[in-house]
Image: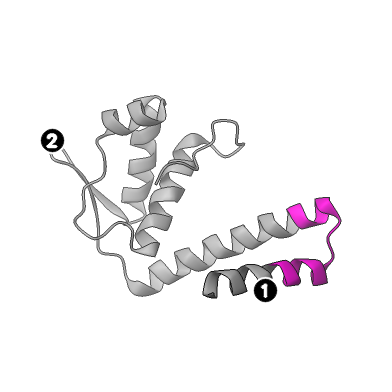
Amino acid sequence: MFDQIDPRSPTPLYAQIAGRIRVAVAAGELRPGESLPSVRQLAARLRVNPATVVQAYRDLEGEGFVDMRQGAGTFVREVLAERRAGERSKHAAALVQRMVAEAGRLGLSTKDLVQAIEQQLEVKVA
């Protein structure tokens, strides 16, 4: 789940961690009531300061994605279907934005890009 955390990214690590958890909740990878790794476990796994993980978890708690329970851990909360759909849409828009920017750097036309997407969709369906 956390394989996309990039210490060289201009996005702060805590925001990357929180974003990845938001996407996992929105996609159903993390279910309500499921526990997240402890702060120490996740910090060690990602090789970041525990305060970074605490900040990510606190942000998620403030947004209603998780509950932090002293001494018990951090657990995924029930998130409304509309909110999960909104998170997926937001993530899809960011994905497309990155793809379009990269296509522009490569000098690809809109037609080239659409054709490549269609080819990938055909491969996925087959």
Q: Residues within 10 Å of mark 1 (few under 14, many from 20)?
A: few
Residue at mark 2? 71
Q: Position of residue 48 (x, y in %)?
A: 42, 26
Q: Is residue 96 above or below residue 114?
A: above
Q: Quadrant of the C terminus?
A: bottom right
Q: Amino acid at mark 2?
A: Gly
Work out whether residue 123 or residue 79 is closer to the camera in this orientation and state it: 123
Identity of the residue drawn at 54% across and 31% down: 7
Identity of the residue drawn at 73% across and 60% down: 100
* Disc with the residue nearer the chain's start (2 vs 1): 2
Region in magenta: 102-116
* Callout in the foreground (2, 1): 1
Residue at mark 1? 118
Q: Amino acid at mark 1?
A: Glu
Which image quadrant for residue 98? bottom right
Disc 2/disc 1 C-alpha distance (Å): 50 Å
Is 111 magenta? The answer is yes
User: Quick one: SS at disc 2?
Assistant: loop
